[in-house]
Amino acid sequence: MEFLVATGIGAVTASGIYLVLRGRTWPVVIGLSLLGYAVNLFIFAMGRLWQDAAPILTATGQVADPLPQALVLTAIVIGFATTGFVIELALRSRHESGTDHVDGFEPSSTTPNAVEDVK
């Protein structure tokens, strides 16, 4: 089970890095989200992968460590807020520059579109 989880985290991380290195803003946003999910899975797996263990305290039986679960739940909420903020930044950049390229201009042009609008 650990091998499958590690492989999944590696695949999500690789996909996130690939998308972050793209030149368009929307793949970068999706890539950042994937990296956030990979970190959440990593934190969750660091708390040990329990089988047949209760997530809360019980009188008998094994109990899973609740700290990684609490950290991941907090990270999920923060990740949603951060993703919303990054989407807003991408929309603002698209509105001001007229393109969704992360540098503000298309690779074929030599000057940024925002500079052309000012002139």
Image (cartoon, rainbow, N blue to C red):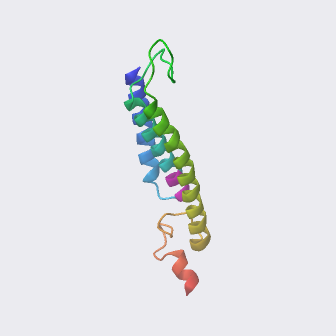
Residue 15 x/y as whole percent: 45, 42
Q: Is residue 26 magenta?
A: yes
Please report the bounds of the magenta region as a residue range: 25-29
Which one is nearer the viewer's eye here, 108 or 90?
A: 90
Q: Which residue is at a point 59% across and 55% down the rendered structure image?
A: 84
In the rendered image, the residue lying farthest to the bottom is 119
Q: Which residue is at a point 52% across and 38% down the rendered structure image?
A: 73
Which one is nearer the viewer's eye here, 93 or 113?
A: 93
In the rendered image, the residue lying farthest to the front is 59
Q: Is residue 26 above or below residue 4?
A: below
Q: Is residue 35 above or below residue 4?
A: below
Q: Which residue is at a point 47% across and 17% down the rendered structure image?
A: 53
Residue 30 x/y as whole percent: 53, 49
Q: Quadrant of the C terminus?
A: bottom right
Answer with left or right where residue 88 lies relative to residue 62. Answer: right
Q: Is residue 3 magenta?
A: no
Which one is nearer the viewer's eye here, 98 or 60?
A: 60
Residue 94 x/y as whole percent: 59, 67
Q: Which residue is at a point 55% across and 45% down the rendered structure image?
A: 77
Please tell me whether the stretch drawn in magenta is mainly helix, strand or loop: helix
Q: Quadrant of the N terminus?
A: top left
